[in-house]
Image (cartoon, rainbow, N blue to C red):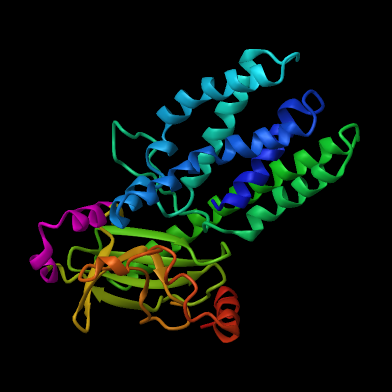
């Protein structure tokens, strides 16, 4: 999830745990604890781009990390707020819940979260929520504003922390239902269209949970397309992208390539852009792919010119966006090609 959502949701949980006992400082502790796993951003100051991709949502998003940090934060908060009537087990439960909820929610995005680091490098991705879904984030955001404005003694504070906590999870349950529906439908369509695949995933298109990005294929290449929950047709338009592993032979022993392959979870293709060898991670979608099915992929890494790879994950996310493509996204969500 995006940082603002973690801050707002964490603040609501802080209010739920402590209410009047430490005043509005509960909001601050909640926002801090919920944000702590994202401290891995500092790794970008000394790691190369390909290494940083694996460091993000790695150890600091693991169960071991939050288990180690829970007593550290609890002892710190206990000492800073003396005298108080909060038992140590309440502090421990609060900080563990905050950080666990952070890494749990991140698992619903498509980046991949290393819950078992450093014992296992497996990344968990449920591919259920877009990383910045306004329909998930708006409720805790509104609640946080109200909790900041209301007096600590206001009887309405309980309503607002419940508003900020319960509505996002009701929406998340709705999204899980959408995921199950779309997966069942897409798998049937792939079988009807005789698409062969050994790897497959669906994940939401930007800013919504009704239009889904589909990838299915194998070591030869991948079929890519979009399917809306409101689509009525019994076929799905797919574009095929060959994997082109043979292009990697000149750089097969490069460490950055090994990092990229591991990060991509095998969902990648390779191509030449002129004299530049490009590695595409398919999991992050295409640049306005619902508008132009042959568009480039959001994540493209220049193997020939690694010094040009700053902001590699975000670089293509909003390229070519304008009013026309935005309106086309709305039309495609509604089930219109």
> Is residue 95 left or right of 152 when viewed as pictured?
left
Q: In the image, what residue occupies the spot 60% across and 21% down?
A: 76
Q: Nearest the camera: 27 or 333?
A: 27
Query: Residue 212: image x %, image y %?
Result: 48, 66
Determine the residue located farthest toward the bottom in the rendered image.
324
> Is residue 138 left or right of 239 when viewed as pictured?
right
Q: Nearest the camera: 236 or 224?
A: 224
Which stretch did the figure color magenta? 246-262
Query: Residue 11: image x %, image y %?
Result: 69, 39
The number of discs equals 0
Residue 92 visible? The answer is no
Q: In the image, what residue occupies the spot 90% across and 31% down?
A: 153
**Residue 149 on the magenta span:** no
Assign the magenta stretch its main secondary structure.
helix
98 w.r.t. 248: above or below: above
Q: Nearest the camera: 222 or 76?
A: 76
Q: In the image, what residue occupies the spot 53% across and 38% down?
A: 36
Q: Quadrant of residue 175?
A: bottom right
């Amino acid at each position: 999830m995006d940082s603002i959502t973690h801050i707002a949701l964490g603040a609501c949980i802080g209010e739920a745990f402590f209410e009047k006992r430490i005043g509005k400082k509960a909001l601050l502790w909640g926002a801090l604890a919920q944000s702590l796993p994202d401290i891995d951003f500092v790794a970008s100051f000394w790691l190369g781009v390909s290494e940083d991709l694996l460091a993000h949502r790695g150890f600091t998003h693991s169960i071991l990390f939050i288990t180690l940090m829970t007593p550290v934060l609890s002892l710190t908060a206990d000492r800073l707020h003396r005298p108080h009537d909060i038992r140590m087990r309440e502090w421990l439960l609060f900080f563990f819940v905050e950080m666990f909820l952070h890494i749990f929610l991140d698992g619903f995005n498509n980046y991949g979260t290393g819950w078992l680091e450093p014992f296992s490098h497996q990344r968990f991705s449920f591919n259920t929520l877009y990383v910045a879904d306004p329909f998930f984030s708006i409720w805790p955001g509104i609640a946080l504003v109200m909790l900041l404005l209301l007096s600590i003694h206001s009887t309405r504070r309980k309503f607002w922390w419940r508003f900020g906590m319960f509505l996002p999870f009701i929406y998340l349950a709705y999204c899980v239902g959408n995921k199950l529906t779309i997966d069942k439908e897409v798998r049937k369509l792939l079988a009807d269209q005789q698409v062969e695949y050994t790897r497959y995933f669906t994940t939401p298109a930007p800013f919504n949970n009704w239009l889904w990005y589909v990838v299915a294929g194998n070591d030869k290449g991948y079929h890519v397309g979009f399917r809306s929950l409101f689509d009525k047709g019994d076929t799905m338009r797919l574009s095929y992208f060959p994997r082109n592993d043979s292009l990697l032979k000149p750089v097969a022993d490069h460490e950055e390539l090994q990092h990229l392959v591991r990060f991509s979870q095998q969902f990648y293709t390779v191509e030449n852009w002129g004299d530049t060898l490009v590695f595409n991670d398919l999991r992050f979608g295409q640049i306005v792919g619902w508008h132009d099915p042959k568009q480039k992929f959001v994540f493209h890494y220049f193997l020939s010119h690694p010094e040009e790879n700053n902001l590699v994950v975000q670089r293509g996310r909003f390229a070519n966006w304008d009013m026309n493509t935005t309106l086309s996204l709305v039309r495609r969500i509604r089930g219109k090609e």
